[in-house]
Each structure stands twice: as C-alpha cells, then as structure tokens.
C-alpha cells in the first residue's frame, strides 16, 4: 500500500452507493521498474466508514501490480460530496 498525493490524481470517478468522488487514474513512479507512468485504477472498493477508497492498479511499463503482490490496493482519501 502506498500513500498517494492528491496532486497525483489525474481523473476522477464516482464509486459506491453514495457516488463518492475518487481518483480514476494516478501519475506516479512504479516501485518495481522505477519509471513514472499513469496508473489506471480498477475495481474500486468504497470504505465510507473510513472515508477511503481502495483500487487495483498495474504498471503500464512492467505490468506488475503497484505493491508487488498479485493484486494491489492503492488507498486514497475520498472527497465528501
């Protein structure tokens, strides 16, 4: 899991029953290959109680999950609507 700056969010999407605003893509450096890329976030999971959203992402360069696991969850604070 990595802490992402709000400046890294490039595109927004709405998630969960409350339609909370969350990042749809992030510009960041891959922890595996070290290249900067745009990571498209998929499979968003809304955690309304903790005001957070988890999502899967793979590096567009080396195709590895951002955390080095088979699946990764990048957490980001969601915005109140």
Image: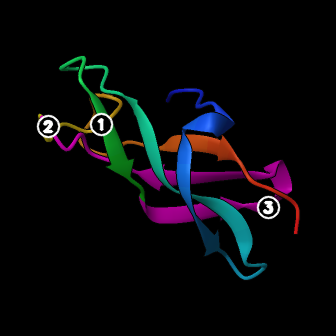
**For the residue carrying disc 1, how many other residues have a C-alpha within 10 Å: few (<14), some (14-19), or many (20+)?**
some
In depth, the one of 61 and 71 nearer the eye is 61
Tell me the distance, in whole angstroms, between the alpha carbons under discs 3 and 2: 32 Å
Between marks 1 and 3 in the image, the one whose residue lies nearer the viewer = 1
59 vs 75, left or right, is: left
Do the numbered discs 2 and 1 sit on residues whose CB atoms are within 8 Å? yes
Tell me the distance, in whole angstroms, between the alpha carbons under discs 1 and 3: 28 Å
The tag earlier along the polypeptide, 2 or 1, is 1
Q: x, y percentage for residue 7?
A: 63, 36
In depth, the one of 44 and 25 nearer the eye is 25
Q: How is the image coloured?
A: rainbow
44 vs 27, left or right, is: right
Q: Which residues are magenta?
A: 42-61
Is residue 17 a member of the stretch shown in magenta?
A: no
For the residue labelled by badge 2, is the local secondary structure a helix, a strand or a loop?
Answer: loop
- Determine the residue positioned at 30% across, 26% down: 30
The tag earlier along the polypeptide, 1 or 3, is 1
6 vs 42, left or right, is: right
Mark number, residue 61: 2
For the residue labelled by badge 3, is the local secondary structure a helix, a strand or a loop?
Answer: helix
Do the numbered discs 3 and 2 sit on residues whose CB atoms are within 8 Å? no
Tell me the distance, in whole angstroms, between the alpha carbons under discs 2 and 1: 7 Å
- Determine the residue positioned at 18% across, 36% down: 64
Mark number, residue 48: 3
- Determine the residue positioned at 14% across, 37% down: 61
- Determine the residue positioned at 35% across, 30% down: 67
For the residue labelled by badge 1, is the local secondary structure a helix, a strand or a loop?
Answer: strand
Q: x, y percentage for residue 43?
A: 43, 65
Q: x, y percentage for residue 71?
A: 31, 46
- Image-quadrant location for residue 79: bottom right
Tag 1 residue = 37
């Amino acid at each position: 899991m990595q802490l992402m700056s709000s400046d890294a969010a490039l595109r927004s999407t709405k998630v969960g029953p409350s339609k909370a605003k969350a990042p749809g893509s992030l510009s960041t450096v891959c922890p595996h290959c070290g290249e900067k890329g745009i990571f498209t976030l998929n499979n968003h999971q809304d955690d309304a109680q903790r005001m957070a959203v988890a999502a899967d992402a793979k590096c567009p360069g080396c195709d590895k999950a951002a955390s080095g696991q088979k699946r990764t969850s990048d957490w980001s604070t969601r915005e109140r609507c």
